[in-house]
Image (tube, rainbow, N blue to C red):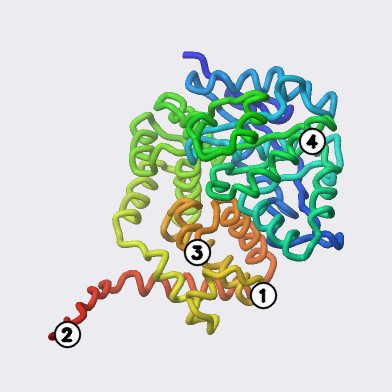
Amino acid sequence: MDIFVIPLNESPPAENIPVVAPSQTRLGRTQNDGTQNAAAQNVAGTSLPWDSMHFLAGPENASICTLANYFLPKLLEQQQAVDHWNPLVLYGPTGSGKSHLVQGLIARWLENASPESCCLINAVDFARELACAIEINQINAFRAKFSRYRCFILEDLQHLQRKESTQQELQLLLDRMVRQGCQCVVTANRSLPQLPWLSFTLSSRLMGGTSISVRRVSRSTRSLLLRDLLAARGLHGSEQDLEKIANHAGNTLPNLRGAVAELELLAKHLETSELAQLLSAWMNKRSTRVPTNDEILRSHAEHFHLTVNQLRSASRTRTVVLARSLAMLLCRELTGASYTKIGEAFGGRDHSTVLHACRKMQQLTALDSAERAAYKQLRGKILSLSQEKPRAPTKRKRRSA
């Protein structure tokens, strides 16, 4: 069976699978006054996670080989758009690896270019910034800000449904950028023909480039990916062990990486690298009741003297942002829910916003002793509450007529 490995950087191979360590990525966007907008820093001030080292593409993703073997080298060499690949549309279901590929592209781009030349923005944030620019009569400054980029990446196009004016502005922006030689990349959860609500002009602009499907990993590729992820943490197991992990974790890349991360933590706690022993403890842990996102939200609101509605709101005050980010991190660690599901519980936020909040909070708890103490205290409180028998919903008495 042929397995294609898409290296996002040059590095010696390990067990026939190239392992790539991208350079640190500092990528942020600025407001009109030149200061960084915290809400818009998708990957600002963070390093790419260790599991972004490479992209393993099996036969189901053979088309991505063209991306690595033709598009990426030409883009990096020219530092400008590649003919017939502009715009480039990456589409596929959640968890297939679109953001993974985008992060690798950014890491390679920034090796030979300044952060100011590249922009990564989610469609939700793009719509919010546009609405804010219109409200304060700064639409020209908004357009000028994007015109200076040489590489423009918009994630999650599907979030622009029922946003006709934003679609029109994006189409005009893409027209200008393509004419200026800026490489544009767009990701979506479905192919363009499966997004019938797209405006005709925006759909035509996107179809004028190249579209590549990113599929979820097959069973054979999944086994190789799990073996590689485990080996990177010093863990080794049989095919039966790998199958157990996959059956309990799910078939998406984030779920598989999350399962391996949990096994690594168990290995440190139990001081053993025997995968069979770790799997037994891991499966027992997963069989116990886990706290719900709502329980975590209520605990955080009570601890920080806030309301659940404040945590779900768009407030950017420091106390609310810290409490919200910490709650997102604990939801991810304790419930194992996807970033998309967590975002839905926090007022309909997109998965990239949750991902960024979790990474920032992981860094903060590692550096700040006060935040680390709050994290441990809340984690213990939530775990103790989750072991209690959940209260049955009370039935409201119906009023007699």
Residue type at numbered disc 3: Phe
Dividing the picture into quarters, in which one does residue 356 lie?
A: bottom right
How far is the residue under mark 1 from the one under mark 4?
A: 34 Å
Q: Give me the residue at 49% from left, 29% from top.
A: 215
How far is the residue under mark 3 from the one under mark 4?
A: 34 Å
Q: Of marks 1 and 2, which one's residue comes earlier in the chain?
A: 1
Task: From the image, tell me which residue sits under label 3.
Answer: 346
Residue type at numbered disc 1: Thr
Circles 2 and 4 in contact, beta carbons < 8 Å: no
Task: From the image, tell me which residue sits under label 1.
Answer: 317
Q: Give me the residue at 58% from left, 58% from top.
A: 358
Residue 37 in the image: state x and y as whole percent: 75, 61
Residue 319, placed above or below residue 59:
below
* Image mark for residue 177: 4
Residue 34 vs residue 357, the one in the foreground: 34
Q: Give me the residue at 17% from left, 85% from top.
A: 399
Q: Residues within 10 Å of mark 4 (few under 14, many from 20)?
A: many
Q: Give me the residue at 75% from left, 55% from top.
A: 45
Circles 2 and 3 in contact, beta carbons < 8 Å: no
Q: Of marks 1 and 3, which one's residue comes earlier in the chain?
A: 1
Looking at the rendered image, the quarter that the C terminus falls into is bottom left
Element type at mark 2:
loop
The residue mark sitting in front, 1 or 4, is: 4
Residue type at numbered disc 4: Met
Q: Of marks 3 and 4, which one's residue comes earlier in the chain?
A: 4
Residue 332 in the image: state x and y as whole percent: 48, 57
